[in-house]
Image: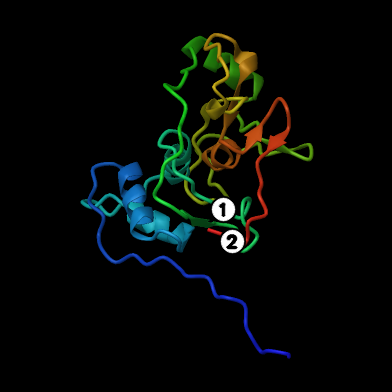
Amino acid sequence: MATDRKPARAKYAKVRKLYTQPSVKKRIEAFFLDNIGRTATREQIMEVAKDPKTGRVPENCHQRLSELRTDEGYTILSWRNRKDLKVSEYLMPTPKKRPYAGSRAKINPKAWRRVLERADFRCEWSDDDVVCGLRSGDKDPVGGGTVRLTPDHKRPHAMDYPIDPNDPDEWQALCGRHQVMKKNYWDHTTGWLNVCDCAGSV
């Protein structure tokens, strides 16, 4: 018997209050915990990340979102994980945290300088041999905001791989957007990409 059943519509997150937590990461965390199982948009994340006193939107929202995954152990899904999510949409299916890696390695300042020189002071993210190439201070044409290059270890920290802070070959310069795309998903040295076909599942 045929039915006219329509596919379930996505439940979208709602910003119901002003988030006043003392840090950008804590404000974003509180928003996701208020909207478990609901789809959050990039615009909503930027809204809740605003400084509650000045109303200023921080330039590091992507980085803080990444840290909730890697440093705090939250599962935050994106279009790379679920086919029913669009680009710039995110979903926290559960407040339960996964085990996460220990203290992060920090690059030696001299090694970081060598990484930047090797990269010509540009983001080194490469996809199908197309290099991002954004410089610090540029306007990100996709993610918005001002670009700030940060050091990234080529193998995900979550894999608990020993990192040499003095070896520039183990590090790369990435913009904030590509830090988010890579962290916990992409292993530069092995080509490992963690994408799951879990549309509709929570």
Task: Kindly identify the amino acid type of the residue bearing the numbered disc 2.
Answer: Leu
> According to the image, label 2 marks what residue?
85
Marking on residue 147 = none
Name which residue lies at 24% across and 47% down: 21
As rendered, which of 168 and 192 lies closer to the eye? 192
Name which residue lies at 43% across and 52% down: 94
Q: Is residue 144 above or below residue 114?
A: below
Question: Looking at the picture, how far across and down is residue 141, in whole percent?
Answer: 58, 51
As rendered, which of 56 and 79 lies closer to the eye? 79
Task: Kindly identify the amino acid type of the residue bearing the numbered disc 1.
Answer: Ser
Q: Is residue 59 above or below residue 82?
A: above
Residue at the far front in the pictured view: 1
Decide if residue 198 is on the left or right side of residue 29.
right
> According to the image, label 1 marks what residue?
78
Question: Looking at the picture, how far across and down is residue 13, in whole percent?
Answer: 41, 65
Distance (Cα) linking label 1 and label 2: 6 Å
| Disc nearer the start of the sequence (1/2) | 1
| Quarter where residue 104 is shown | top left
As rendered, which of 130 and 196 lies closer to the eye? 196
Q: How many marks?
A: 2
Decide if residue 69 is on the left or right side of residue 186.
left
Q: In what element is the residue under mark 1? A: loop
Q: In what element is the residue under mark 2? A: loop
State if disc 2 and disc 1 touch (CB < 8 Å). yes
Question: Looking at the picture, how far across and down is residue 8, in whole percent?
Answer: 57, 75
